[in-house]
Image: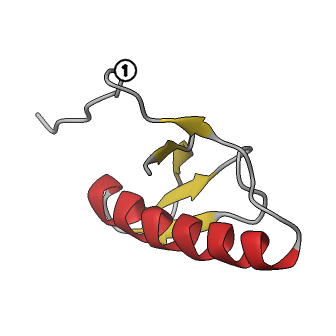
Amino acid sequence: MEQIVNLHIEHLPEGVYLATSDDIPGLVAQGRTVTETLEIARDVAKKLLEAQAERQGAIHLKQAGDSFDYPLVVSG
């Protein structure tokens, strides 16, 4: 079952990207590129969701349906 987690990604003055989420409290991921940051955020989100489900029950997120919008970031 795939779920949608909204991320906020910020480019920091230090040159790295930082991802946080209001959907999953505690989700913080940092990487050198947007792609690396997204990969780390996906792993962190999965672990946080698993831990939350064991302790207090699952966090209810929007299910990824047959279609949804996804912002594609490309370098130019």
User: Is residue 76 left or right of 63 when viewed as pictured?
Assistant: left
Q: Which residue is depicted at the point 65% across and 41% down? A: 61
Q: From the top left corner, tell me how far across and down residue 21 is, in percent.
A: 66, 49
- Residue located 85% across and 78% down the image: 55
Q: Residue at left 77%, top 79%?
A: 54
Q: Is residue 41 left or right of residue 21?
A: left
Q: Is residue 75 above or below residue 48?
A: above
Indicate the position of residue 58 as horizontal and vertical percent values.
75, 59
Q: Position of residue 34 (x, y in %)?
A: 34, 53
Q: Residue furthest right?
A: 56
| Residue type, mark 1 in image | Asp
Q: Is residue 16 visible?
A: no
Q: Quadrant of residue 44?
A: bottom right
Colour mapping used in the image: secondary structure
Point out the image quarter for the C terminus: top left
The residue labelled by disc 1 is 69
